[in-house]
């Protein structure tokens, strides 16, 4: 069966994103251990930054004074900003005393007695536009995949209501700022509903009626065993017309990205590849091309077998770690906890992800 005519790219104010695209999490304005030029070297197209964290550190007034996220971070490519809803929800879920969720949005503190923050649908759009984001994400009511049906249904209703308010605020501010044509940022809606097909359909149809430039899979994408919720992901792709790009929030494992692309998703973001890199878990291809069979493996740099490994981490990688250094040297850096290790390891895993993008395009 032939692949449907899904979009192949997305134009943004800071450049075009070719699909598929993995967006590493530059949560607080930086991908840990690397700088903007390192990201360019690895071939990254875009990054994700987070409104929840940025509104606290360095703070919105500081970001505005420093010229917005691009000037602040030195990154010249597209930036997708998460609304911050998931992080605020996580704080409240972990400790209800630190915040509350109402029909108007989220109110939270990071710690007892700390400053109180408000995150409404209007506020998150105002912040994301002020930061200079290329792709904005609407505020949604996040649920755990196994939350009971009444919680899921209430979250869908809130998500739809908030999406309408986000859309209205976005349109108003874009018009006021005169952002037209190539200068106009994109707005993505997020579909909630847990595992319930009827709720997913209800949310998707309502968001389609409101109208967005793209859509995201909302909620945790893995089941209790850590397996990708392929049936729910596939359902959402069926519900969203193929001309709209779909973003897999929180999907970052290489196998899950390959599967998500096969299901019809175009973009993905996660902290997993860079976090794995810093912890000594490095991805390598086992074959020169393709993603069939057992096409990749994970090297664990603490393993003693790497002590005298004279070859590179991967013969199929052209990152700085593989073209200049041996696996034995990387093992040494990891064991002595040298600051060079997280940079080289992160560059390697990020380059793996961009090479994976190339392979998936070729396989399509």
Image (spheres, rainbow, N blue to C red):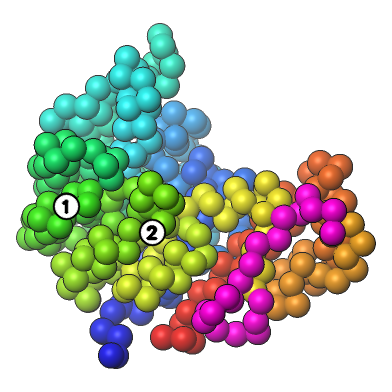
Left or right: residue 251 compared with residue 231: right
Q: Is residue 351 visible?
A: no
Magenta highlight on residue 293? yes
Rendered image: mark on residue 49: none
Report the front residue among 291 and 39.
291
Instruction: Report crowding for label 2: few under 14, some 14 to 19, many 20 or more residues within 10 A (C-alpha).
Output: many
Left or right: residue 123 compared with residue 133: left
Look at 55% across and 84% down and name the residue there. Answer: 290
Look at 45% across and 47% down and name the residue there. Answer: 49
Report the front residue among 154 and 119.
154
Look at 84% across and 49% down and name the residue there. Answer: 333
| Residue 205 sits above or below residue 199 on the image | below
Left or right: residue 312 compared with residue 260: right
Whole-Å distance between the Cαs marked 1 and 2? 16 Å
Looking at the rendered image, the quarter that the C terminus falls into is bottom left
Percent from the top left, x then y, of residue 170? 20, 49
Q: Is residue 316 visible?
A: yes
Extent of the magenta region: 286-305
Tell how many labels: 2
**Residue topped by disc 1:** 196
Q: Earlier in the sequence, mark 1 or mark 2?
A: 1
Report the front residue among 39 and 96.
96
Which secondary structure type mostly characterizes the magenta part of the structure? loop
- Residue extending furthest toward the top: 113
Look at 74% across and 72% down and name the residue there. Answer: 314
Q: Secondary structure at mark 2?
A: loop
Looking at the rendered image, the quarter that the N terminus falls into is bottom left
**Residue topped by disc 2:** 228
């Amino acid at each position: 069966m032939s692949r449907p005519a899904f979009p192949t790219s997305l134009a943004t104010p800071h450049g075009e994103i070719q699909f598929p695209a993995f967006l590493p999490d530059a949560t607080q304005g930086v991908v840990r251990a690397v700088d903007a030029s390192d990201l360019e070297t690895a071939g990254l197209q875009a990054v994700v930054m987070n409104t929840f964290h940025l509104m606290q550190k360095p703070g919105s007034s500081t970001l505005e004074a420093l010229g917005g996220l691009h000037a602040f971070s030195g990154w010249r490519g597209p930036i997708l900003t998460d609304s911050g809803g998931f992080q605020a929800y996580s704080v409240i879920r972990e400790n209800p005393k630190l915040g509350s969720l109402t029909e108007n949005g989220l109110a939270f503190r990071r710690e007892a007695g700390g400053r109180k923050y408000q995150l409404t649908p209007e506020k998150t759009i105002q912040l994301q536009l002020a930061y200079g984001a290329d792709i904005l994400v609407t505020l949604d009511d996040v649920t755990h995949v196994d939350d009971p049906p009444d919680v899921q249904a209430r979250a869908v209703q809130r998500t739809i209501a908030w999406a309408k308010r986000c859309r209205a605020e976005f349109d108003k501010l874009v018009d006021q700022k005169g952002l037209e044509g190539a200068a106009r940022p994109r707005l993505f809606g997020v579909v909630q509903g847990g595992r319930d097909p009827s709720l997913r359909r209800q949310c998707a149809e309502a968001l389609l009626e409101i109208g967005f430039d793209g859509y995201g899979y909302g909620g945790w994408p893995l089941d209790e065993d850590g397996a990708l919720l392929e049936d729910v992901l596939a359902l959402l792709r069926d519900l969203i017309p193929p001309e709209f790009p779909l973003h897999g929030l929180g999907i970052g494992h290489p196998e899950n990205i390959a599967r998500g692309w096969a299901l019809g998703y175009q973009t993905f973001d996660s902290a997993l590849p860079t976090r794995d890199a810093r912890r000594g878990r490095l991805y390598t291809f086992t074959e020169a091309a393709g993603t069939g069979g057992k096409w990749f493996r994970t090297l664990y740099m603490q393993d003693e077998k790497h002590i005298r490994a004279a070859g590179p981490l991967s013969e199929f990688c052209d990152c700085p770690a593989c073209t200049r250094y041996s696996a034995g040297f990387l093992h040494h850096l990891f064991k002595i906890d040298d600051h060079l290790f997280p940079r080289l390891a992160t560059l390697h895993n990020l380059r793996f992800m961009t090479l994976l993008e190339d392979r998936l395009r070729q396989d399509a």
